[in-house]
Image (cartoon, grey):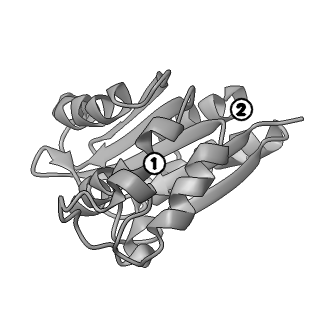
Amino acid sequence: MGKKILAILGSPRKGGNSDLLSDAFLKGAMESSHKTEKIYIQQLHLKPCMACYGCRETEVCVQKDGMAEVLEKMIESNVILLVTPVYFYSMSGQMKVWIDRVLPQYTKIKNKEFYFIATAADENAALERTFDALSGFTDCLPGATVKAKIYGGGFYESGAVKGSKAEQEAYELGKKA
């Protein structure tokens, strides 16, 4: 039986370079008989964490939106793919808001394998800060392992990543996930 792979996309637009690289990863994963699902953070209409700690006792955020469902899917998944464009040398605002909203259930997201994809107009070296920030998130999750980072640097125009080395790498890593 294959793994459950959950892709979380922090890009505000569908069909962009981040989305295309996630599609390549998920295509490889599906060809290896893994079950995949993709969630676009933008569609969840999340509000930032209010630091009210209302979730401390209930493990449920007081804000009623799509986040509770995403947390359940994370807990049930074996592999989580975090995908973000790089804006001003960091992850998208959508991705950061989503990470902060994991708080109610973060201790239950145990022993997961993570893969990161980041895309940017700048070259690959510009992605390091973003990968460091994503690693900071996974460092807070019990037993999390970062398996690979896929660098999508040097792609500005939407679709520019098609046929690239990064797309092939994403596909191959998806097959091995």
The residue pinned by badge 2 equals: 175
- Is residue 154 shown left or right of residue 107? left
Percent position (x, y) of residue 143? 50, 21
Pointers 2 and 1 in contact (C-beta within 8 Å)? no
Q: Quadrant of the C terminus?
A: top right
Compared with 17, 113 (above or below) is above
Camera sees residue 162 = no
Residue carrying label 1: 105
Q: Which residue is at the far left?
A: 88
Task: Give the residue at x 57% y 26%.
Answer: 111
- Pick whichever, 90 or 24, lies toward us: 90
Relative image position of residue 65 (x, y in whole percent):
43, 77
| Other residues around mark 2 within 10 Å, as few (<14) / some (14–19) / many (≥20) | some
Q: Which of the 4 quarters of the picture holds residue 153?
A: top left
Q: What residue type is labelled 1?
A: Gln
36 lies left or right of 70: right
Q: What SS does tag 2 mark?
A: helix
Looking at the picture, how far across and down is residue 165, in whole percent?
48, 34
Q: Which one is in front in this view, the residue at disc 2 or the one at disc 1?
A: 1
